[in-house]
């Protein structure tokens, strides 16, 4: 069954980038140290910032990310601190290198999921995007985490370089014992590759018709073998309402320099609506992302209109063909999970 997952109105998601440093340099990496900072946050600051959301802990999910969060020597202590505060769920996003022997410093009772990133079903494709040897290291990490009884999920970021291997992923996930699959997208463009100007600036974007044809089919195939699959909705049907997560949901994207964004598409710009100062969450001055959330345009998401206009297409009379959903709106297929 296909479900559009509306934003969770009662949950809070804290996406906590505890550092921006990484051992890899993936082609599509969105981390921008000029905008996000370069520090490894000390444990004392991590605890303080986790505490800034402590009044919401019972409904708050924390996702530790980087950079590569396992490069942080105190990640295990940060997880234990979040547990003590009563966070509802804890996830660690990782490229699979699992530094500081993190699997032996935590137990499956302390972490809900290790979420591994892999961008190809074969070493050749994955390593072209993520770096030589990263496929084998990621698979070794997944195998070990599964053997040790940790919850494991996998994130596949679709681009023009790996779209052709997406259909091999359900079988690979089944073999590895992974039951949760997240498909992400680098960006979509409205024109086909053959058209002049159709290719995205970095050559990695996927065209909309391929996305619409391939992604739902792969998600269905994964669900048939018991793998819950989640992917971005992207295009809204004419009768579907547009909602902006910045207004309707509680997502916080925290960076080591203290910036806190409510919209992931704003992260490359100094548009954050909140900042962590002296351990407190404070509103920033105008103009910021929250001024954009209220703009009502026929194209749907305002930030998409500004940053990725290539995925918009218009009728000859100027009407929009598909409104673009908030990037946080997902389709979910397969066995119901825990919503984490
Ligand atoms: S593993 Fe993640 S943080 Fe590191 S380079 Fe790749 S995308 Fe960026
Ligand atoms: S992606 Fe668009 S719709 Fe979603 S929070 Fe950002 S501005 Fe709002």
Image: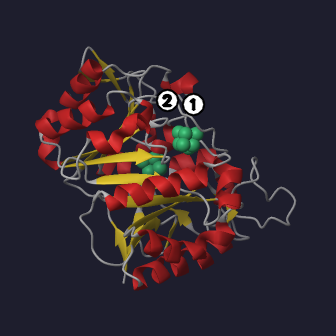
- Per the image, the residue denoted by label 1 is 32
The image's colour scheme reads secondary structure
- Callout 2: helix, strand or loop? loop
Quick one: quadrant of the N terminus?
Answer: bottom left
Tag 2 near tag 1, CB within 8 Å:
yes
Asked which quadrant contains residue 318, the reply is bottom right
Where does the image place residue 94, in percent across and percent down from the top left?
Answer: 44, 46
Quarter of the picture containing the C terminus is: bottom left
Q: State which quadrant residue 106 falls in.
A: top left
The tag earlier along the polypeptide, 2 or 1, is 2
* In the displayed structure image, the side of residue 330 where residue 54 appears, left or right: left
Percent x, y for residue 248? 30, 52
Q: Residue at the location (45% across, 19% down)? A: 39
Please say if 219 is above or below 140: below
The reply to whether residue 83 is visible in this rendering is: yes
Dot 2 beta carbon under 8 Å from ligand 1: yes
- Using the image as rendered, state which of residue 253 and residue 121 is in the foreground: 121
Reply above or below: 210 against 267: below
x and y percentages locating residue 187 in the rendered image: 62, 55
Does any atom of ligand 1 lie closer than 8 Å to the CB of label 1? no
Question: Any mark on residue 20, and which?
Answer: 2
Q: Residues within 10 Å of mark 2 (few under 14, many from 20)?
A: many
Residue found at x 46% / y 66%: 231
The answer to whether 289 is drawn above or below residue 300 in the figure is: above
């Amino acid at each position: 069954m296909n479900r559009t997952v509306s934003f969770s109105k009662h949950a809070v998601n804290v996406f906590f980038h505890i550092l921006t440093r990484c051992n890899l340099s993936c082609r599509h990496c969105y981390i921008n140290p000029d905008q996000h900072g370069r520090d490894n946050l000390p444990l004392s600051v991590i605890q303080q910032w986790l505490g800034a959301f402590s009044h919401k802990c019972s409904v708050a999910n924390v996702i530790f990310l980087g950079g590569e969060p396992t490069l942080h020597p105190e990640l295990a202590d940060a997880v234990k601190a979040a547990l003590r505060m009563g966070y509802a769920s804890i996830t660690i996003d990782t490229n699979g290198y699992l530094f500081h022997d993190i699997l032996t410093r935590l137990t499956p009772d302390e972490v809900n999921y290790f979420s591994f990133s892999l961008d190809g079903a074969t070493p050749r494709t994955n390593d072209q995007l993520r770096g030589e040897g990263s496929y084998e290291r990621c698979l070794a990490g997944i195998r070990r985490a599964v053997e040790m009884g940790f919850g494991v999920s996998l994130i596949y970021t679709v681009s023009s370089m790996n779209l052709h291997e997406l259909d091999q992923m359900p079988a690979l996930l089944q073999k590895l014992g992974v039951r949760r699959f997240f498909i992400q997208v680098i960006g979509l463009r409205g024109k086909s590759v053959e058209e002049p100007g159709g290719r995205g600036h970095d050559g990695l974007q996927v065209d909309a018709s391929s996305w619409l044809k391939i992604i739902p089919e792969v998600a269905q195939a994964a669900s048939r073998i018991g793998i819950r699959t989640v992917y971005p909705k992207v295009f809204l049907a004419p009768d579907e309402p547009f909602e902006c997560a910045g207004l309707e949901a509680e997502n916080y994207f925290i960076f080591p320099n203290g910036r806190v964004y409510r919209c992931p598409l704003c992260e490359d710009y100094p548009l954050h609506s909140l900042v962590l100062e002296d351990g407190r969450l404070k509103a920033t001055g105008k103009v910021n992302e929250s001024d954009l959330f209220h703009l009502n345009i026929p194209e749907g998401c305002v930030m998409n209109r500004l940053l990725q206009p290539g995925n918009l297409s218009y009728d000859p009379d100027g009407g929009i063909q598909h409104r673009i959903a908030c990037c946080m709106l997902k389709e979910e297929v397969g066995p119901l999970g825990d919503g984490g």
